[in-house]
Amino acid sequence: MDSIAILDFGSQYAQLIARRVREANVYCELFPWDALESQVLEIDPKGFILSGGPASVYAPNAPQIPGYVLESGLPILGICYGMQALTNALGGRVAPSDEREYGPANLETVLPNPIIEKGWHKVWMSHGDRVEVPPVGFEVLARSGNSPAGFIGDIPRKYYGLQFHPEVRHTPEGAKFLRRFVIDVCGINPDWTPESIILASIDRIRDQVGDGKVLAAVSGGVDSSVAVALVHRAIGDQLAAVFVDNGLLRQGEVHQVISAFNQELGIELVAVDAVEEFLTALRDITEPEEKRRVIGETFIRVFESKAVDLGGADFLVQGTIYPDVVESQAADRSKVDRIKTHHNVGGLPEDMQFELVEPLRYLFKDEVRAVGETLGFPREMVWRQPFPGPGLAVRCLGEVTKDRLARLRAADEILRAELAEAGLLIIESREDGVKGTAQAFAVLLPVRSVGVMGDQRTYQEAIALRAVTTEDFMTADWARLPHELLARIANRIVNEVQGVNRVVYDITSKPPATIEWE
């Protein structure tokens, strides 16, 4: 399969570049700029994209383009810092701009080229340096008011540089520009489709597993469900799907998951009641990372015990997806600060007896959903909102107890029911724009405040409501829910949930916050 290698120079938008390329039905992988040559060339790329970054190319020890990239003779597209690094490597001149350019700009195409058609285009700039003198062989193809070399190219060699960011939505035609580079310039066949993902995944699973026995961890979320369905399609009866009731699930979830697998997907699901084991393990633990570690280890111990009951297993299936990996650790395990540990990528014990099978590890959420639809999943499963692997434990701030979980579960059910009634529980594209929420949930805070109920003083806990809109879960914005809806939800929670007398709404975006509170 043809592919693109994206070299990351530290851009906050690097994952968006990968998403836009995948949206063009072209496979790509994201690598640190200084990744091993053998690692990058292993995917046999047909072209390179160089991301932006925070450095200046003329600064000491600034990241530079690896020699093998230029020696390959393959097409190159540099974006922002990537453009400046390309210019610097080929003998051009980069210098600080008299006026930094951040935000919207108008770009005028001045010469014909295969990427940006003639005319004016709205783009998104974010730079303090600019190309003053393009390298020999390059021409200025487009310019903006503060970037006389807003788009440069050596058309015969298929080298191009964009001063702006085509990967962000603030550049309306940016996805089209990237598509033209990867398909028209690099000559790649756009064959990265749900059907091809399924076929490739089945082959990889069979190669990895062979005749081994496989145990699948089912959470009920779309990620683990699609992962299990792929493995089941690949190896059939070699798979035993196990659903653990850990006591950290939402209201009615145990019945819903078991019913969906047995009836909708035709996959026999083995249910394990491990509520007491998890609550005992979590007793007195309040630190988020320790919660995740304990939950991850307890999951594995439960699976190991169940594997013995089922006659043994060599492999464990998990629904790890790309945002899980990025937030937990970098692609090379060292380049990105860890934000938090996801239990299925960072909370597993070192002495685990299983080898992991992760068919979705480098897929984005929208790709997972597309695969699910192609596999025949019912719509309500495919578009089910994400639910964290550690479950309600990371939404129950402070100590996790049965009483506090029941309180949180009841508040969360009210929120979800009211959003569903208002048609806002999932994201939908309409003629008047995008409506709904990509993720919405309640958080129980370990904070008590004074209230008045029936003329009596109360001193009870608070619920925080969180609802966000997002395309990729790498960034997110808080959902602008109608005030009347928020008032109704808050009123119901305070009146119907014992032990809660205050409700607040989280209006923080990601970044700086994460979507989950822990």
Image (cartoon, rainbow, N blue to C red):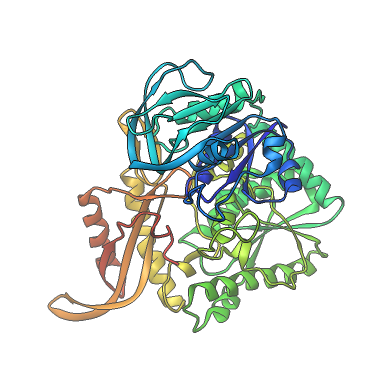
Front in this rendered view, residue 239 or 11 = 11
- Which residue is pictured at 60% across the width and 77% down the height? 277
Does residue 377 appear anywhere in the picture?
Answer: no
Q: How many marks?
A: 0
Front in this rendered view, residue 131 or 179 = 131
Is residue 268 found left or right of 466 in the rendered image? right
Q: Where is 448 relative to 237, above or below?
A: below
- Which residue is pictured at 26% across the width and 65% down the height? 503
Residue 212: x %, y % from top left: 84, 55
Residue 67: x %, y % from top left: 69, 42
- Which residue is pictured at 79% across the width and 69% down the height? 308
Residue at far left of view: 455
Front in this rendered view, residue 296 or 150 = 150
Q: Quadrant of the C terminus?
A: bottom left
Residue 96: x %, y % from top left: 40, 44
Does residue 169 appear anywhere in the picture?
Answer: yes
- Which residue is pictured at 47% across the width and 37% down the height? 167
Front in this rendered view, residue 468 or 144 = 144
Q: Where is 512 relative to 15, above or below?
A: below
Residue at far right of view: 211
Is residue 64 found left or right of 412 in the rendered image? right
Is residue 509 found left or right of 353 in the rendered image? left
Residue 477: x %, y % from top left: 36, 49
Is residue 233 found left or right of 467 in the rendered image? right
Q: Where is 325 relative to 364, above or below?
A: below
Q: Quadrant of the N terminus?
A: top right
